[in-house]
Amino acid sequence: DSVVENLPESVYPSAVFATDWGIEEGQYEIVGLMDAFLTKMANKPVGKMSPCQGFITLDPTMSAEDMCDLASGYNNLFMTLITNGYDESEKDLAGPRAGQEASLRLGTSPAVDDNSLKGIQGLMFQWSESDREVLNAAGLEVLIKETGVHTYVGVTTNLDDSFYRTVDVRTICACIIIVDQIVKKFMNERRTATNLARM
């Protein structure tokens, strides 16, 4: 939060990540803090809006059912909870996943083979096909290893079809920032035909 507050006015973070899910064993406070942070970023005053996507890898010892229970408490189109986000050497992949999302062009899905995470050889574990479907339907991201390691779909905790996929949220974030900057230029201007035409 401190870093974001001190960024130059023209710099907008497009993706952030946390390096842990909680402070104490079995607690998921950082997930809640990420949810609050992402909501705050999207609800800043006019002229300062900077929505971004946030990524957290969940505890790999959690069951699919427990992950679904945790995700059911959130409905944030900007937040992605990764269910199996550790590589075979136990490196957390939330950072690489956030970097991948930040670097993709608008309209480009992170789920295609060409967009595999760079430098990642394998995963600590993979879900069965049935678990993968259940987790994805609950708004939880699943990574898969095929020709490379990439997301199965790329989803958020918001289950509304318009806000469910990270590829769509990336575009939404960009549009909000652009519209906010246009509106900022016309704040407190008189409602004249000339100003309306300019806008």
Image (cartoon, rainbow, N blue to C red):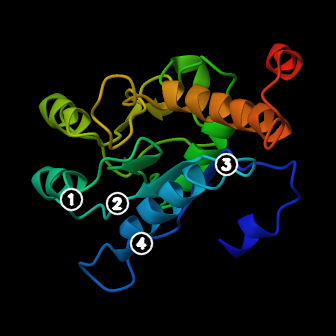
* Residue found 37% across the figure and 51% down from its top: 81
The N terminus: image quadrant: bottom right
State the separation of the CA atoms marked 1 and 4.
Answer: 12 Å
Is residue 20 placed above or below 135 in the rendered structure?
A: below
Q: Earlier in the sequence, mark 2 or mark 4?
A: 4
Q: Which mark is residue 70?
A: 1
Q: Amino acid at mark 2?
A: Leu
* Residue beneath disc 3: 49
Contact, mark 4 vs mark 3 (Cβ under 8 Å): no
Q: Earlier in the sequence, mark 4 or mark 3?
A: 4
Contact, mark 2 vs mark 1 (Cβ under 8 Å): yes
Q: Amino acid at mark 1?
A: Leu
Helix, strand or loop at label 1? It is helix
Q: Earlier in the sequence, mark 3 or mark 2?
A: 3
Classed neighbour count for the residue bearing mark 1: other residues with Cα under 10 Å, few (<14), some (14–19), many (≥20)? some
Contact, mark 1 vs mark 3 (Cβ under 8 Å): no
Helix, strand or loop at label 3? It is loop
Q: Is residue 47 left or right of residue 25?
A: right
* Residue beneath disc 2: 58
State the separation of the CA atoms marked 3 and 2.
Answer: 28 Å
Q: Amino acid at mark 3?
A: Met
Q: Which mark is residue 161?
A: none
User: Is label 1 or label 3 in front?
Assistant: 3
User: Is label 3 or label 2 in front?
Assistant: 3
Q: Earlier in the sequence, mark 1 or mark 4?
A: 4
**Whether residue 20 is visible:** yes
Q: Is residue 130 left or right of residue 100?
A: left
* Residue beneath disc 4: 30
Contact, mark 2 vs mark 4 (Cβ under 8 Å): no
